[in-house]
């Protein structure tokens, strides 16, 4: 009972009636609403909007391509649409619902101030083809954002337009290729450490390079000797993440940069893990030539279901001339956009990455995030992110197996060593976390350790929420070690969907609705 005399404990607390097991008539379980497919709810002839019947017969304008019959899409009313998607969203885990151990590399807390700023009509209602004189404020936002990115990275130029980290990698390697071509060189290889994110080798291959893998040393970092042995005049670039995907700082980064420069190659840094170092170290000082910054990771701009993202790329002196169009310039009259190669004075842009200028909404959110934190606040966010991860590492390493010695950066990496002989796998362990009310951490990545469990709590979790999370993981690790495997086999038990055959779902996806046979 609380002080108002009202029950405050969930059911099952001592002295309370435990609910019997029963099936409900509706299929709902209290607040958890059962939800059918739209195809099962929808009816032909039902529609959520009223459209006027066209006065003339428009089919004549379709050049004979008009549809011949019904396409069988379900019609639903507006409240049905709203309920359908709200109910589905309630079956999902989200950063707004609880601690999200995938961290900034998927989604960190998005301060609501950012949303308020992005919804200002002057930003939200812009059209990319509006006359320049009517979008001076938006261009100023892009200019200020560029300034922050240049200052934080210590690099002289930035391209804002790429729309994701992977898109930024493509942008960076295209600039590398343009710079090499300008020297009259065509190089064949790009070096990628074996712990790299999959987009790195994919980008190099998409740009026509051969991917050459650099092994990791026993400390989880690039094996510098093996790396140097691979360098040669046909190496276009190395693509390196720092901190790397094991959550470790590449201590030899300056030596790595110098070595690739010595053979005339470039240093591409995957900046997805910038959250660990922003405000602490400037990648430009480490010898980086190009680096994408995932605004939707480090700078908190939200992205769901694959978009929108924003992956601006910063460039060194050597690559800056080849950076893509468009970019913002300021003269006595105000701001302008350089959109054509002929207007790019002293530069040789390789082209453009997108039709227009990039993700304006993300630019506004990212700048709001930067300005509300200030330079000192960004630095503190990075430090707190590293502190949180180390708190988790230190609190769990007696019951789970930490993959590498020593402290981590913003991610704590464990492998499945602690599960050896228990019959419980990394997958089972992760699924049991769903019953605990947590989204699992990154599993089976990076590939350099066996059965990886990679936890990134970010800076915004309180000690209380970290302790609860640690408590769950300690509890589960204890059960596994005691041989109490019933919580693992077949988990999750308390989620709307039980254990799914994810392999079959990926290999044999059912993408078309077919009515069940009567
Ligand atoms: C997320 C991520 C990427 C790709 O970024 P997207 O915005 O998802 O395209 C690349 N490298 C690393 C290390 C990442 O974490």
Image (tube, rainbow, N blue to C red):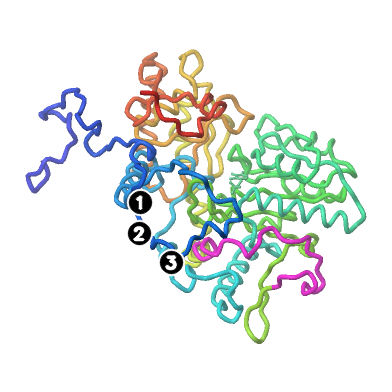
Image location (x, y in percent) of residue 407: 55, 39
Residue 376 in sight: no
Ligand 1 location (quadrant):
top right
The dot on residue 119 is 3
Q: Is mark 1 within 8 Å of ligand 1?
A: no
Give the position of the N terminus as an image quadrant.
top left
Asked whether residue 469 is drawn in magenta, I would say no
Q: Check whether the beta carbons of the residues at disc 1 and disc 2 lie within 8 A of each other.
A: yes
**Residue 285 relative to residue 261: left or right:** left
The chief SS type of the magenta part is: loop
Q: Earlier in the sequence, mark 2 or mark 3?
A: 2
Q: Which element carries disc 1, helix, strand or loop?
A: loop
Image location (x, y in percent) of residue 271: 63, 50
Q: Residue furthest right?
A: 184
Q: Is residue 451 above or below residue 36?
A: above
Which residue lies under the disc numbered 2? 50
- Foreground of the two, 92 or 368: 92
Quarter occupied by residue 290: bottom right
Q: Which residues are magenta?
A: 338-365
Quarter occupied by residue 497: top left
Residue located at (46% from left, 40% from top): 101
Residue 251 in sight: yes
Q: Check whether the beta carbons of the residues at disc 2 and disc 3 lie within 8 A of each other.
A: no
- Foreground of the two, 438 or 35: 35
Q: Which element carries disc 3, helix, strand or loop?
A: loop
Q: Residues within 10 Å of mark 3 (few under 14, many from 20)?
A: some
Q: Residues within 10 Å of mark 2 (few under 14, many from 20)?
A: few
The dot on residue 47 is 1
Spatial distance from mark 1 to mark 3, Cα to Cα?
29 Å
Camera-near label (2 vs 3) is 2
């Amino acid at each position: 009972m609380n002080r108002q005399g009202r029950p405050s404990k969930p059911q099952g607390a001592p002295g309370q009636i435990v609910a019997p097991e029963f099936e409900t008539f509706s299929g709902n379980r209290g607040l958890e609403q059962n939800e059918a497919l739209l195809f099962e709810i929808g009816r032909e002839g039902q529609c959520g909007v009223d459209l006027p019947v066209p006065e003339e017969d428009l089919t004549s304008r379709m050049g004979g391509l008009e549809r011949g019959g019904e396409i069988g899409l379900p019609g639903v009313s507006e409240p049905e649409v709203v309920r359908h998607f709200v109910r589905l969203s309630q079956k999902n885990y989200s950063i707004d619902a609880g601690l999200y151990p995938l961290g900034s590399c998927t989604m960190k807390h998005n301060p609501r101030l950012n949303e308020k700023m992005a919804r200002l009509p002057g930003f939200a209602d812009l059209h990319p083809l509006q006359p320049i004189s009517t979008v001076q404020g938006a261009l100023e936002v892009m200019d200020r954002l560029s300034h922050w990115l240049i200052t934080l990275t210590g690099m002289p130029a930035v391209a804002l337009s790429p729309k994701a980290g992977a898109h930024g990698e493509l942008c960076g390697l295209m600039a590398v290729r343009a710079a090499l071509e300008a020297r009259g060189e065509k190089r064949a290889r790009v070096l990628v450490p074996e712990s790299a994110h999959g987009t790195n080798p994919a980008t190099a291959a998409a740009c026509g390079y051969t991917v050459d893998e650099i092994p990791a040393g026993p400390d989880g970092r690039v094996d510098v000797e093996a790396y140097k042995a691979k360098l040669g005049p046909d190496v276009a670039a190395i693509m390196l993440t720092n901190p790397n995907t094991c959550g470790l700082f590449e201590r030899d980064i300056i030596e790595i940069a110098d070595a690739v420069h010595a053979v005339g190659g470039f240093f591409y840094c995957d900046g997805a893990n910038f959250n660990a170092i922003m405000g602490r170290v400037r990648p430009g000082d480490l010898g980086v030539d190009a680096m994408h910054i995932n605004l939707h990771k480090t700078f908190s701009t939200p992205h769901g279901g694959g978009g929108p993202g924003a992956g601006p790329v910063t460039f060194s002196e050597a690559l800056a001339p080849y950076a893509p169009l468009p970019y913002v310039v300021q003269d006595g009259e105000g701001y302008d956009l350089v959109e054509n190669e002929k207007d790019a004075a002293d530069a040789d842009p390789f082209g453009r990455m997108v039709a227009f200028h990039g993700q304006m909404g993300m630019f506004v959110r990212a700048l709001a995030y930067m300005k509300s934190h200030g330079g000192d606040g960004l630095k503190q966010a990075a430090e707190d992110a590293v502190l949180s991860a180390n708190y988790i590492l230190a609190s769990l390493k007696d019951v789970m197996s930490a993959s590498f010695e020593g402290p981590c950066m913003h991610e704590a990496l464990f492998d499945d060593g602690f599960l050896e002989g228990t019959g419980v796998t990394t997958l089972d362990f992760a699924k049991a976390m769903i019953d605990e009310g947590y989204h699992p951490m990154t599993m089976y990545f990076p590939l350099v350790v066996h059965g990886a469990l990679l936890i990134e709590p970010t800076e915004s979790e309180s000690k209380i929420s970290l302790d609860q999370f640690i408590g769950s993981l300690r509890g589960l690790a204890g059960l596994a070690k005691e041989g109490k495997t019933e919580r693992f086999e077949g988990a999750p038990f308390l989620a709307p969907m039980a254990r799914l055959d994810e392999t079959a779902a990926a290999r044999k996806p059912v993408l078309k609705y077919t009515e069940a046979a009567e």
